[in-house]
Structures are given as structure tokens and as C-alpha cells.
Image: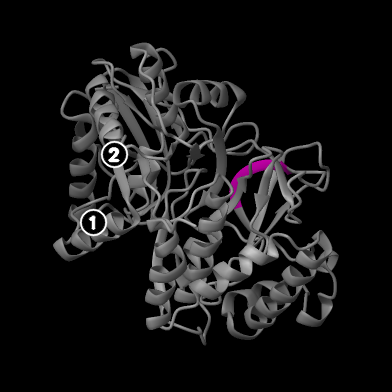
Amino acid sequence: MKISYSNILESALIPAYYRLRGRRYPHYRTLLERSQWWSPDQIQQFQWQELKRLLAHAFRNVPYYKQKYSAAGIELGDIRTPQDFAKLPPLTRTEVNAHRLELCASEPPSRLLPHATGGSSGVPTRFFITIDSYDWRCAASDRAYSWSGHHLGEKTFYLWGAPVGKVPAFKSAKMKGYRLLRREVVVSTFSQTAELWQETLSAVLRFKPRFIVGYVSSLEEFARFIMTKRYALEGVQAVIAAAEPVYERTRELVTRAFSAPLFNAYGSREFMSIAAECTQHHGLHVNSENILVETELPSPETPSEFLVTDLHNYGMPFIRYRIGDMGVMGRSTCPCGRGLPLLGSIEGRVLDMIRTRDGRVIPGEFFPHVLKDVCEICEFQVEQISLEEIVVSVVLSHPLSESSQTLLRDETAKVFGNDVRITVKPVETIPRRASGKRSVTTGLRSSTSGTFDWTGTPGL
């Protein structure tokens, strides 16, 4: 049997690296490969045992949960079944931001790693995870990608975002080494032009990837470019779409353009991989050994908000967290034979594209990606007023610092240049749609090019 680079990397080099560092990734990866074939009852039993351990830790060591559940009249001994668990009051983004330190365990099992997300609902969230939780996430994410046929070390091309701010030289070199080892190429698609797509196509033809991963909107635009130019890509085994909903028209377009099937993957910064499709495309398998997903409404026909519990982040537990996305749970098992539960559909996370006068396209994901790193912003909403103006409404905890204003100017200039006026407008509240969700990024439906303007902070 021929031994490939991917085989060596995945089965020997990466496990050896983690074991030398005393990390548990190899153990979790092996477990997940086995557990996905357990029966639904076995998976539910494993999940329930992990959940009970997490709840015992939260009731004992997390100040905010002790206060929150006590106020609701719930004690640990009251939670004897999954139905009892569903009575716990959900956790919101507002609570996470307002009580971040109180949500951290008084006795965390290891040092805490800071993370942040821009949020699909327009509320940036800053939080912490543990190293062990990160290993669980990476193992679950690698397994989810493997359902498309992807394995570590196989050539993978990313249509993705760019780092925010100035990246230290050491960190930049480390990331380049990481990408080289894993044989990955990443192209930022936050400013989309015909020139970008031509350069991207040239890079793809040189690199000859077997897998292409990207934001849904970026994959769509690149696919249209390929179809318009009548190029034919060879050797692509699968395309993995993330960050935005996948509709049938997207699946058909991408499949035609790349001559490869599209696999939908659902995740978030708070939890990393949540669910993904397998080759049957019968719904998205939930990584249930690491994540518990519920819908707020019990009806399987009516979309409602997902409540997500991270079973292994003992440093800052997220329990029944309102993630801001809506959908329905699957009602059947997958023909593939995996016992993992399914998400039937994901209805949220629609971020409009922003288009510029000179024909460039900027994914709506750009603003959440940048604004998550501006600590003063509690909520935001982006609206493209015209081809010359974008208004970013923000609810602030306190006035923007000079460094935050500089970060915003620099990052928006990278993408928009100086042809679009970007106004940051402090407001008291962000309006919601009838559904209760905010419209995070609203672009012009037909056809933005950026100067940055700070309009002041009334009342602050």
C-alpha cells in the first residue's frame, strides 16, 4: 500500500507533536473516529455523562451560574434527565459580555486562552477556552472535514479572511510554517475584483489543490468567475462551504464550476465545528461528543434559535447558549450509518454582500471579522447607504480609544481604499427585525468603494 504524505502527517507527525506537548488531541481524534459509528443511544449516553460532569463543575466552580441557577430555583440535584436540563435558563451574548469574569471557573483546569467572535447577530462576544477544549474542537473539526474525504496534509486552498491588525513577526512565521506543513494556501477574499479572481485562479492552477474551502459568498463569486471565463479545474475532490447558509442554487453553481461536490459545514468562533455534511448530504451531523445542540422550540417543523452547550470548556462554560442562529433539527437518521444526530436546516447567518462602484465585492462577513477585535463595541449594524457611503451603527461600552479608531481606519482602508466614506455612528440601541434578530450587514441589492469618519459619541 502506498503511504502518502497525508498518512504520515495525520497518523505519525501530528500525534507525536501533541504527545510531546502533553496534549490530548490524538486521543480525542481516535475516540471520535470510533464513536461516530456508535448507535444513537450510545452517543446520547456518552453525551449525557459528559454533560453531567460539566454541570457539576459549573454549579460548584462558576460564580455566575451558581447565582443564575439559584435565582431560577434550580439546584444540581434537580437535573436528573435531559428534560430537566432543558429547564435551565439559556445564556445570552449580553450576559457573556457583562459577566465574563464571573463566568470563568474559580478553579479552571488549565490556563485560559482568549477568543472573540463578531457574532452573526451583531453582538461581538469575548470569551475564554481551555487548551483541552481547544484539542476537542480541533479533533471534531478535523473529523467533520474528513466526511468530505479531506485529511490533514492534503492540498487545500482557502478563500478566507485576513488577520486583523499587525501580526507579530514570530506569529506570522509560525503561521506560515503551519500552513506549509499542512499544505494549505489561504487567499483573503475581503476585497473581490476580477483581478483577485484571476490571481486566485492562477494560484489554484499552480497549487493543484484537492480541496477548496471558503465563505459561501466567496465560493459563489469565484465559481461565477470560473464559469464566465469557461475555465475547467481538474483534480478538485470536494468544496467545503462555511460561515453562511448554503442554498440549492449555491450548491448547483459551485458543483458545476469546480466539477466537485459541495459540503456544508456549520461552526462558530465560540465552538469551532458544530456540524457538517457527509457524502449522503442528508443533513449536517452534529459533533455530539463535544457539542450539545437544542432548538428553543420543540417543534421539528418550525425554525427556532439554536441553544448550544460546549461539553468540555471547563474554563468558561457555555451552557444552553443562544448562538444567534436559527434552524431545525433533523428528524431521521443518515443513510451513512453514523449515529450522530442531524441538523435539518440552518436558517440564520445571512450577511449581505457589499458591492463597490468599481465592481468589487466585499463579503458581509468582513465587518463581524474586524469588529470582534474592537473591545468597546457591544453591538453593531452595518448598512450600505449608497455606493459612496457605509454607516456602521455601534453601541459602545465607552468611547473608542485612539488605538481602536486606528485599527478600524487601517482595516477598512485595506479593503475599501479611499473611495467609500465609512461612518461610525454611536447609537443607544440597534433595531431588530420582526423575527427578533438584527440585520447585521445590509448591502445594496443592486450594486460600495473608503474614508473613515468618526461622528462623535453623543451622550458618552
The secondary element bearing badge 1 is classed as helix
Q: Which residues are magenta?
A: 323-328
Q: CA distance from mark 1 to mark 2?
A: 16 Å
Does the magenta stretch mainly form a helix, a strand or a loop? strand
Say whether residue 100 is visible: no
Contact between marks 1 and 2 (CB within 8 A): the answer is no
State the residue position of label 1: 176
Name the foreground residue: 344 vs 59: 344
Q: Residue at x 45, y 28 (%)?
A: 352
Mark 1 burial class by Cα count in 10 Å: few <14, some 14-19, many 20+: some
State the residue position of label 2: 207
Name the foreground residue: 138 vs 19: 19
Disc 1 marks a residue whose amino acid type is Lys
Q: Residue at x 45, y 63 (%)?
A: 10
Q: Give the colour scheme of this rendering.
A: one colour
Figure quadrant of residue 161: top left
Q: Residue at x 37, y 75 (%)?
A: 17
